[in-house]
Amino acid sequence: GRGDDARVVVVIGGSFGGLSACRALWREWVRGDGSGRGSGGAEALHVVLVEPKDHFEWQPAALRCLVRPSHARHALLPVGPFLASLEESSAKRSQRSLKMSWLRDSAVVLNEDHVLLHRSGEKLAFDACIIATGCRYASPIRPHSGKFELIDKDQRVDAMRDWCNRLQSSKSMLIVGGGFVGVELAAEVAHYHPHVGVTLMSSRDRVLDRCPRKMSQAAARYLVSRGVRLLMNTRATERSKQDFDFVVDCFGGTANTKFVQQSDSQQVRCSVAQMEHNQRVMVAESLQLLPAAADDESRRSQRTPIRHIFAIGDVAQLPYESGENLSYHAVDQAHVAAFNALAICDGTRGVGRNNACVLRKYPQDVPGAVSIALANGGSKMRPHVVQVLSLGPRRAILRVENFALGGLNMIAGGLAACVKMLIEQLSTASFRSAQSPSLLTLELLEKVVAYMVALFYTLIPAQK
């Protein structure tokens, strides 16, 4: 139940963005942000996570788990103990009450003051809501495809083993899509299952077409060296797919926003963007939902956001062209959304002049945001870009903005692979417990890298 003095924040979705939002709410609640909370502030907070899976899947390792299911023990983490650690830590560090609840359910309708749940039929009321439901992709890359079934960790591992067994019995494989997922999957299969003839097909003129050309070339050279056949400027047809034992689609993604589109509120319902049919929800710089779909910047700036509903991660259509959707971007967005949600719920956080509530903005208020010039002579902010592309367990490519390091070269490629391994170990450990020292280490490294990127971006001309 909820007391009259308790504030309720509902987090829908338990992947990177959702669990990071829970952790950020815990941190902001315990910290109090040093903003001088007065007597009018809330004394109790109830965070409710709505997520049908019983585990968190560290998504950057999903492809490794498919071709080598034994790796799943490192990448699939239980949700319950993590939330319990947040509540336990809060009880030790704060006099205010924090309750963390987890409902294994799915949202079917989001309204302005409550969310309707599928299995229980409950109308879950909230003071603020953070949407972090992500996107649905071709199975089995992501286990939750916007459906309502409960997914247990053991079921997910069994599905990975079945997929791997099918792969082992195949002689040829077609991967459709030359983005990050397609390239990583091709490299993993080529390393762990060299008997399978892999063909990567893309309608683009090069793999990783949204990345710097040097990174694209390094990835292509590595794949060719491992026997992968690249077919660029080619669209897959049903006829062409029949020539292969195993076909995997690795392109696109549609946001899980059906429950938003089913809203009784026209404002909420009309926040869903239809451009390119990605069905993401439009958000302002504060990550609050915008009440109408508009891709024109001037029209967007005239909209009044929905005050207490936020969206983060893959599900959010941000005010800038984001390019690749990166997991650490979702984590940064979670911190902004959590602060803003508590600023609205608490009533005393982030108070500026004339007692106005001052909300944080993304990406302006996260470390390492960089400024890019516009054609009209103006500029806008965007988050920095650091990516690690795995090419099997021993090689990788590290991208920092427009610079790329790694690939076939044993030293550079091996160093990039070590960076990926370190990130995985620190990140997964940080989602096991609120007390994990890995969280502080990871956040420190992220801030150092972010500020270095922002500095060098202004000093070094970009590579094309």
Image (cartoon, grey):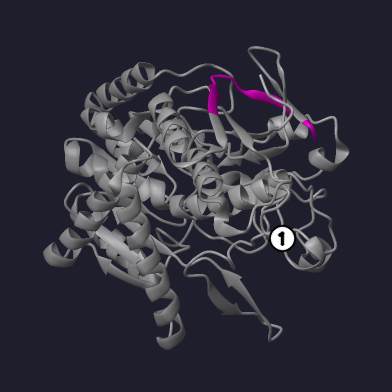
Q: Which residues are magenta?
A: 100-113
Q: Which residue appears at 70% of the width and 16% of the height?
A: 122
Q: Judge from the rendering whether residue 401 lies leftward or rightward of residue 394; answer left or right.
A: right
Total numbered circles: 1
Q: Which residue appears at 21% of the width and 55% of the height?
A: 417
Residue 272 % position (x, y): 74, 44
Q: Which residue appears at 56% of the width and 77% of the height?
A: 371
Can residue 165 be seen here? The reply is yes
> In the orientation shown, which residue stands out farthest toward the left?
410
Asked if 159 appears above or below 135 in the picture, the reply is: above
Quadrant where the N terminus is found in the figure: top right
Quadrant where the C terminus is found in the figure: bottom left
Asked if 233 appears above or below 463 in the picture, the reply is: above
Q: Judge from the rendering whether residue 124 lies leftward or rightward of residue 245; answer left or right.
A: right
Asked if 423 appears above or below 128 in the picture, the reply is: below
Asked if 393 appears above or below 51 in the picture, the reply is: below
Queried whether the magenta region covers residue 300, the answer comes back as no
Residue 391 % position (x, y): 25, 51
**Secondary structure state at the residue bearing disc 1:** loop
> In the orientation shown, which residue stands out farthest toward the top?
120
What's under tag 1, amino acid-wise? Val
Which of 101/171 is in front? 101
Which of 402/24 is in front? 24
Can residue 391 be seen here? The reply is no
Residue 407 % position (x, y): 23, 62
Say which quarter of the image contains residue 455. Answer: bottom left
Residue 62 % position (x, y): 35, 37
Q: Judge from the rendering whether residue 62 lies leftward or rightward of residue 263; answer left or right.
A: left
Say which quarter of the image contains residue 240. Answer: top left
Which of 194/43 is in front? 43
Which of 64/199 is in front? 64
In this figure, which residue is indicated by the disc labeled 1?
Answer: 351
